[in-house]
Image (cartoon, rainbow, N blue to C red):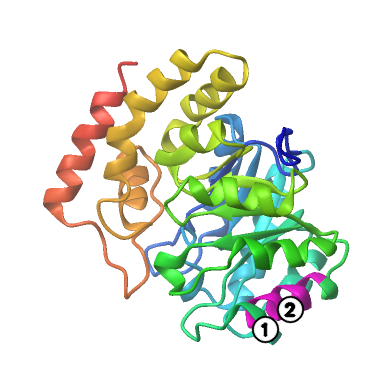
């Protein structure tokens, strides 16, 4: 048996929602609505929440807004719910500072993305993440690999070298390949908890050792996402597959264009006025909005 062939821990739970950031009519962060949405997501099955990530439009939030949002969500959900803050940057000093501020503001962990645009070599990626880990040794970290956004990918061998940092405990795998999960487990062992970064790949990733998902769809179908995970883990793969197949149209609709454009529209259609994305992202176009509305309507009877 492979040394990696054992179950990984679940440091933040199994179902994490990558929260949108609500904006009011003037485009300011709506902290009160963020708190209400956070409580709703927990009520609908989320074990934890990620604020100020990709779905939360972190590139267009100021650092001050990000701290305020983290504090509002932390206060809204109280203890017992994992709240992670997206603190990544392509500037190592900025990422270190943001992660320290998140720890001080009550985060249970930090989501730190691979540096974007400057495309560092693997040695630079190792130095970047090591600096963050060493600056916040008590704060659990989730490394985030999403090469489609960053133009750069961290290799499993590099992650393995970072495993001597005790607070690097998890990894959000968003490369679009289940092979990444296997490669990481073989390189790092079972201590690294791997989360799917793609709703549509959650079920196959569970089958090769992922522990859960950082989800967008759970804004709308949190209970069904949780049911799929629980069915798989309880030895009911056919039930889990049924959930997966029913939800695939929604997964596709939520990524028909750049995230979080569709999910913000879906929330509006579902009675959550979270506002439009900040420029350079734009509201969902009318044709896609109509198609999304049909997809949501088809889900409601079940």
Main SS, magenta region, reads helix
Residue 131 x, y percent position in the rendering? 77, 78
What number of labels is visible?
Answer: 2
Q: Are marks 2 and 1 in contact (CB under 8 Å)?
A: yes
Residue 173 x, y percent position in the rendering? 54, 53
Measured in 3D between alpha carbons, the distance from the residue under mark 2 to the one under mark 1, in whole angstroms, is 6 Å
Of the pair 66 and 130, the residue shown nearer to us: 130
SS for tag 1?
Answer: helix
The magenta stretch spans residue 142:
no
SS for tag 2?
Answer: helix
Whether 134 is drawn above or below 268: the answer is below
Find residue 96 and name its label. Answer: 2
**288 left or right of 301 in image:** left
Residue 186 x, y percent position in the rendering? 67, 48
Write the residue at 82% across / 67% down.
104
Whether 25 is drawn above or below 216: the answer is below
Write the residue at 36% across / 49% down.
263
Of the pair 51 and 174, the residue shown nearer to us: 174
Residue range corresponding to the magenta coloring: 124-133
Residue 296 x, y percent position in the rendering? 28, 32
Q: Which residue is mark 1?
A: 92
Whether 127 is drawn above or below 13: the answer is below
């Amino acid at each position: 048996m492979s040394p990696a062939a054992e179950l990984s821990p679940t440091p933040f739970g199994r179902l994490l929602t990558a929260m949108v950031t609500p904006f009011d009519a003037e485009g300011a962060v709506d902290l009160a609505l963020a708190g209400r949405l956070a409580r709703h997501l927990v009520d609908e099955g989320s074990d934890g929440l990620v604020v100020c990530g990709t779905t939360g439009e972190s590139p267009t939030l100021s650092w001050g807004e990000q701290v305020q949002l983290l504090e509002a969500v932390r206060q809204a959900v109280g203890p017992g719910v994992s709240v992670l803050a997206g603190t990544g940057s392509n500037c190592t000093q900025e990422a270190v500072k943001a992660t320290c501020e998140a720890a001080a503001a009550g985060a249970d962990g930090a989501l730190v993305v691979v540096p974007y645009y400057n495309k560092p070599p693997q040695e630079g990626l190792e130095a970047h993440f090591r600096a963050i880990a060493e600056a916040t040794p008590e704060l659990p970290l989730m490394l985030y690999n999403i090469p489609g956004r960053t133009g750069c990918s961290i290799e499993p061998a590099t992650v393995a070298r970072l495993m001597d940092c005790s607070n690097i405990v998890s990894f959000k795998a968003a490369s679009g390949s289940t092979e990444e999960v296997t490669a990481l487990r073989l390189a790092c062992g079972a201590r690294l908890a791997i989360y799917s970064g793609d709703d549509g790949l959650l079920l196959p990733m569970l089958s090769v050792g992922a522990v859960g998902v950082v989800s967008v769809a759970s804004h709308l179908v949190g209970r069904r996402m949780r049911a799929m995970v629980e069915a798989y883990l309880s030895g009911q793969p056919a039930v889990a597959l049924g959930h997966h197949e029913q939800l695939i149209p929604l997964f596709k609709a939520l990524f028909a264009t750049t995230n979080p454009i569709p999910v913000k529209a879906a929330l509006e259609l579902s009675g959550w006025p979270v506002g439009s994305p900040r420029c350079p992202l734009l509201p969902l176009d009318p044709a896609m909005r109509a198609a999304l509305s049909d997809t949501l309507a088809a889900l409601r009877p079940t």
